[in-house]
Image: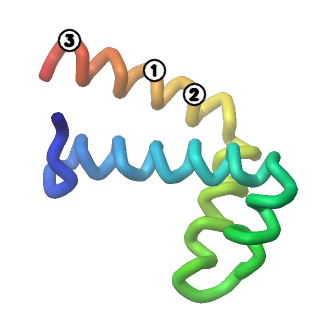
């Protein structure tokens, strides 16, 4: 189990948010509910979905690297 207060836990949490928001962007009903705000606190989820869709290759490599890190080194 990772801790959110550690640096690697923070990276894992950010990757989880980015991957989840990128998935929600592809589902029309979820996109309308969660990703309609582009500013403010809920705008973070919109921006995470943009990062997840535009940088999907880099996010996938980072997710793979963090999975190996957590499974083997932690």
Q: Classify residue 36 by image quadrant.
A: bottom right
Q: Which mark is residue 31?
A: none
Q: Residue at x 13, y 22 (%)?
A: 74
Q: How many marks?
A: 3
Mark 1 element type: helix
Q: Residue at x 60, y 58 (%)?
A: 48
Q: Do labels 2 and 1 touch, CB within 8 Å?
A: yes
Q: How busy is the neighbourhood of tag 3: few (under 14 within 10 Å), some, or many (20 plus)?
A: few
Residue most toward the front?
29
- Name the N-terminal-most of marks 2 and 3: 2
List the residue tagged with mark 3. Answer: 72
Q: Residue at x 76, y 53 (%)?
A: 25
Question: Considering depth in this image, is 3 or 61 the residue closer to the camera?
Answer: 3
Q: How busy is the neighbourhood of tag 1: few (under 14 within 10 Å), some, or many (20 plus)?
A: few
Q: Position of residue 62 (x, y in %)?
A: 47, 30
Above or below, 34 against 13 in this view is below
**In whole angstroms, how far apart are the C-alphas of marks 1 and 3?**
12 Å
List the residue tagged with mark 1. Answer: 64
Q: Which mark is residue 60?
A: 2
Q: Tell whether 72 sits left or right of 67.
A: left
């Amino acid at each position: 189990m990772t801790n959110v207060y550690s640096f690697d836990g923070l990276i894992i949490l950010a990757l989880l948010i980015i991957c989840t928001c990128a998935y929600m962007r592809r589902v029309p009903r979820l996109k309308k509910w969660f990703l309609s705000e582009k500013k403010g606190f809920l705008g973070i989820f919109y921006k995470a979905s943009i990062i997840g869709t535009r940088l999907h290759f880099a996010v996938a490599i980072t997710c793979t690297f963090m999975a190996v890190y957590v499974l083997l080194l932690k």
